[in-house]
Image: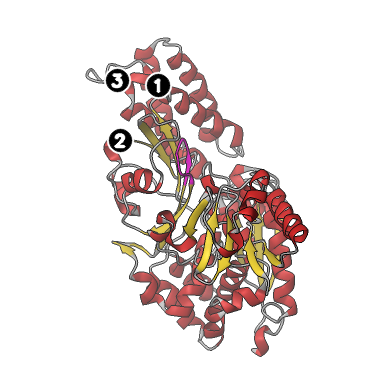
Amino acid sequence: MSTKIYVPCDSSAVSLGADRVATAIALEANKRGIEIELIRNGSRGLYWLEPLVEVQTSKGRVAYGPVQTPDVVSLFDANFITGEAHALSLGLTEEIEYLKKQQRLTFARIGKTNPVSLSDYLDNDGYRGLINALKLPQADIVKAVTDSGLRGRGGAAFPTGIKWNTVLNTPSEQKYIICNADEGDSGTFSDRMVMEGDPFVLIEGMTIAGLAVNATQGYIYLRIEYPHAFEVLNSAIDTAYKEGYLGENIQGSGKAFHLEVRLGAGAYVCGEETSLMESLEGKRGLVRFKPPLPAIKGLFGQPTVVNNVISLASVPIILDKGGDYYRDFGMGRSRGTLPIQLAGNIKHAGLVESAFGLTLRELLYDFGGGSASGRPIRAVQVGGPLGSYMPESQFDTPLDYEAFAAIWAVLGHGGIVVFDDTVDMAEMAKYSMEFCAIESCGKCTPCRIGSTRGYEVMDDIINRRDLDKNIPLLRDLCDTLLNGSLCALGGMTPYPVLSALNHFPEDFGIDAKAGA
């Protein structure tokens, strides 16, 4: 009987040598006459341990990591195929503390299965939500999502059920479902992990969305920097068509849904839903004026649901176990779970899925293990390049949309980038202005001109020129960006700039006691 050995095909694991390790394991097993079944699974999200090799034993899956090609011979010498001890042994995978403390709903399968195996997906509760949805009236599907309390996981946190209900009740012969997979925020990788590690859950979620609002066509708008995800998604979509989970007659129901992947061209602003739709229509990615909302007049002028990858990937479990089940996780108006991504100067970089309510301090130290440098953590940026910089005094803030809003911060897509005490926060504020200037679509003056002027002002501040004039000017520019920009790119650039200025005034040449 062959032994199942799992080596991730996740692009981050591959970048760390997973392909080479998989090849070395196959060659060594063949050399020793040992029969194995080599399975390329998704990543568990413990990136400091990648490549993470797992072996199926009578006791469960045993993990070893990080494994490099030179380690393979010694692993076989130690009889790792039966789970024996080795210097890289981590014990039973499910007992690793980092994983054990999580509450994985959306990521329940990722790391356990072969991503492109439909049988693996079905054997692990896949498509149960869709089968339930096929039996329900459209309004009941929308109600289940509404009752779950699911809010947009892409950053805006708009209630998903309200958006779906608007599209459902807007008459049209053609409606669309768009998955925003243009994951462009710094320190974020949860969308990529889903698409590479469990593509069928996204396909299932989009199909349910299509059934719910009577949309027959879906598009996954994928950032061009994700070639592995592009390949995996297309393979899974082909399988779904062949097995009747996509097409004109889904599982004999007479209901139709079609799906395809479209690649973006690298513009950050196309992560904004109206720019994304312009790009999908073959136009330059410029922000549209709202109203009309995309739910009323979206892609090609038709009612359109635009949701993030994690939002759509959360739908199958809601339709499988019910809205109440999902709503029981979380706190306040932040229901369910959120995949948090720890990146930057952090010892244990990776993905943590847990119910809302964990604090930043718990994430940074209980999961992240503190800074990779061993120095004190001075600041974290939460929510991508447009998110606020949060000082140590705010580390006890719970992960909750309203709690973050109350301190002028954003939870966003759940990305957390960590900085130790060597960071210059004035330089980080300058970078935020530069980022906005580079990525602006140019349609509105505050963003196009304000960010360029902001970069110039920050350069003056860093060089300590006319601080009495330039600090108030910076605040004035931020006010213009905040209140005058057409979309969130310009409108949120003040978040990192002003939070850096307010919480770390000494880096701007300001006496913290005297103020600006």
Q: What segment carries the magenta color?
A: 342-349
Q: Horizontal and vertical percent for residue 294?
A: 55, 61
C-beta proximity under 8 Å, tags 3 and 1 = no
Identity of the amino acid at label 2? Answer: Glu
Q: Nearer the viewer, residue 398 or 497?
A: 398
Q: Considering only vertical position in the picture, is 402 above or below 185?
A: below
**What x and y, as percent, mark residue 423?**
43, 25
Q: Is residue 293 visible?
A: no
Amino acid at the residue labelled 1: Leu
Inspect this view and state whether residue 113 appears. yes
Which of pointers 3 and 2 indicates the residue nearer the eye?
2
Q: Nearer the viewer, residue 358 or 372?
A: 372
Q: Disc 1 to disc 2, how far (Cα)?
A: 27 Å
Q: Which mark is residue 516?
A: 3
Q: Earlier in the sequence, mark 1 or mark 2?
A: 2
Please name the predominant secondary structure of the magenta segment in the image: loop
Residue to which mark 2 is pinned = 392
- Secondary structure under tag 3 reads loop
Q: Residue furthest top?
A: 465
Residue located at (60% from left, 65% from top): 198
Badge 3: few (under 14), some or many (20 or more) residues near its Cα, within 10 Å? some
Screen quadrant of the N terminus = bottom right
Which of the 4 image quadrants contains residue 323?
Answer: bottom left
